[in-house]
Image (cartoon, rainbow, N blue to C red):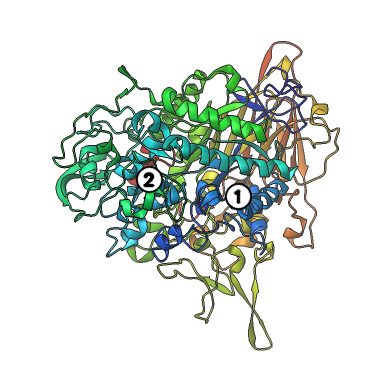
Amino acid sequence: MPRAPSVSPATGLPVRPEYLHTIETNFVDNAGRTILLRGVNLSASDKAPLDHPSQVLDDFWESAENGGESFVGRPLNLDDGSADIHLARLRGWGFNMLRYVVTWEALEHAGPGKYDYEFMDYTIRVLRKCKEYGFRVYIDPHQDTWSRYTGGSGAPYWTLAACGLNARNITATNSAIVHCEYPTAEDPNPADLPAMIWSTNYGRLAVQALFTLWFAGRDYAPKCIIDGMNIQDYLQSHYIEAMGLLADRIRDAGDLLDDCVIGWDSINEPFEGFCGYPDLNEYPSEQTSTLKKGTFPTPAQSFRLGMGKAQMVDTWTFSVFGPKKGKQILVDPKGKKLWADPSTEPGGVHPKWGWKRDPGWKLGTCIWALHGIWDVESGYVITPDYFRTSPNDTDREVVFLSDFWKPHWEAFGKRIRQSHPEAILFVAPPVFAPPPPISESLLKGILRGKYGSHLPAVKIGEKAIRQSLQEQLGVLKDDAKILGAYPTIIGEIGIPFDMDDKKAYGWTDDGKYKGDYSGQQKALDASLNACDGPNTLNFTIWTYSPDNSHAWGDGWNMEDLSLWSPDDLRRKAGYRMETGDSSSAGLLKKVGDSAATSSLSLSTIQAIQSGDGASKISRISSLSQWENAYDFLTDGARAFKAFCRPYPIATIGTPTNVQFDIAKGEFKLTVRVRSEDKPRPEALGRVKSSSDSISSSDTEDDEELATEIYIPLVHYANDEVIARLSSQDQADDDKPKSSAASQISSSDTIHEITSELNFPPSHDPWYLTLSPKVSISAPLSLSVSASQGRWAVDGQILKWWYPVPSEGEREYTIIVKRDGGAIKTVQEESPSVWAQLWATFCPSLTV
């Protein structure tokens, strides 16, 4: 690894000790060690305000039309102690990175230019709490299918009105599927929303029109002028300024930049809209980022539906083998139009939002008819290839990435760099699209994050599936070479935990499989294993939702991908969990009392303490509820053996191969070390041996730097820890079985040195040693062999020292096993066919 520079490539200023470099496709700390960033998205819950998940219709439109709601409280409650519990859990799982979800709506819901500074200040408090626990963070300005009001998340309600839409008629015109109005606004039953159907909104009129206006309004909708500017500039300028003000707030906090907040996405999963669309009378014949499921009108049909005209449209189903065309059905808006009536803006001025619309932009008609693309009366499409070329150069087909996405990314990055000069700007083009070439002057300190370029062919057999996934993510990593030698991070990767008709929740087969996440474990392990091997990819798993429930998942469009759920907490004396009503699921109730608690957060679990013949209730705001660290880290966690896995946090040299076998509990790391890889501990200043380690002791500042490997307690805990948990009254599926020794032993196969590390008994509760900067530790049971050097264990960190050659390069290997064999749970069996094929088709969250 070339020596980490002492000055920033972005600003030319001397770098601080916590600075994170990007060198030779890797993240590198200031001492020169390769850093692997692995973590989770925090959180899917951030897509909507508290107490208003996507299934709730009550006050949905009324609140939006009056300026929306505050997002304070998303993602964590900072006042009841639960934030510390959630962050301690995430840190104990070995994560060192958070992808922090923020929506435009959360910042500017009250109207154009009306910013929610209270939410910004709350966000600063949450980020400081994340910093206390040692997390690096990058900000994710999140959207899915534009907005909550078009069936997704992201933009505030007023953007729809600005674009001339009557959002109340979106469902009637089939312009988007909105969860709380599914299947109809008149008779909604949101529990019936089909899985992933929300993503079909990318193929429906509202979202297609909005993204076309956002990215290419100047080209394709020149008549759409509002407050004297084209709608493209109006929308983008408001969005960039809202995010820029949040960046200003983070800067002004004075203690968050670079050592905590390291960078920004520009916009999650940007969408092309109609840009480049070849024929408006057809939909693409190939499976792209738009899922075919349910009704699927062509763009021409959607134009007519948007003007209130009934259409016979195709329907599609989607199975593990792909989309399948079904019968046609009649969709009849009964005269309702997607486009706002002129009477809503007397004199061209909106009475609520205040903008003035140009006289040339006539409300009440489709904007594409206004631009002569089709005729409303006949329904005929006059220019079916209108979006294929630029109106200013009809001989050239447009290239969305370079013509439309790249200018927005550059403008966004320029504004963020005003507030955060050293920010890493993440390059996240549309799903399945490789990044476009970007000039070196703009690339300083960036990286790409997202997905591979195509779906793999169906693979049969677990070994073939795992190999295929690893190859696919290798293609993704190679895509980054278009930009240069920059690192890659997978922004979202994960699996649904409600697969197989929620079998693991006990909802099928008379509850026979309740708590059995073996299929999910196989699927998630296959995806994360693909990030290991020679790929050694950085990633953030989607997602961690503190208020997840079995009934409503993550509280957004029936998605259920959270690694943890309060509905999966083990039954213990004093409290139990029940499924709540349609508006709030997973309510936790006191035994024998029908009164529900007022919140779904972990802190409001009600524990009963007996005394004086009466029940006394205490809210859980500390770790005293759990018997030991193993109990804490596994309670409520789903498929934890898949995501809580060993990995090299900081490596002297470069990790060239990472292998982890769950079934055997065996981890193998191979590193390549060159003469230039000798670390410089002085470059870390007063920082400890690793600013990224999950360490539990105060080592000397001048300690020789080591390669640091996360060794998860959940895989390597000793028998005593497990036995104490097994003696509790817990669900059978979580009971671990092992006959391993209760101490750590080590062996160096080259030098035949053995050592034993014994832990003195402690009479204090295990959690008293936990603080934000001192993470979870407990006795491990390890058998270690290293081809060279020495090692030691510190909490859940194995430190490995080996010689750096004076010239040339060397390769070293370390193998870590659990002494006595892997910890087994009662139900670890073959996954369902769906679980295997999910991993094949969906290595990341978004299809």
Residue at the extreme bottom: 613
- Quadrant the N terminus occupies: top right
- Residue at 58%, 69% in the rendered image: 605
In what element is the residue under mark 2?
Answer: helix
Type of amino acid at the residue the image marks with label 1 = Val
On screen, residue 662 versus residue 689, left or right, reads left
Q: Quadrant of residue 763?
A: bottom right
| Mark 2 crowdedness (10 Å alpha carbons): few <14, some 14-19, many ≥20 | many
Name the residue beneath numbered marker 1: 714
Between 221 and 588, the residue placed more toward the observer is 221
Locate residue 12, reporting x and y percent: 73, 21
Camera-side mark, 1 or 2: 2
| Mark 1 crowdedness (10 Å alpha carbons): few <14, some 14-19, many ≥20 | many
Residue at the extreme top: 807
Measure how far apart labels 1 and 2 are at the Cα level: 23 Å
Is 421 above or below relative to 130?
A: above
Locate residue 248, reporting x and y percent: 66, 41
Locate residue 51, reporting x and y percent: 50, 63
- Quadrant the C terminus occupies: top left
Type of amino acid at the residue the image marks with label 2 = Ala
Q: Would residue 238 be visible to someone looking at this image?
A: yes
Name the residue beneath numbered marker 2: 835
Q: Would residue 664 be visible to someone looking at this image?
A: no
- Residue at 55%, 41% in the rendered image: 140
Q: Earlier in the sequence, mark 1 or mark 2?
A: 1
Locate residue 456, reporting x and y percent: 35, 30
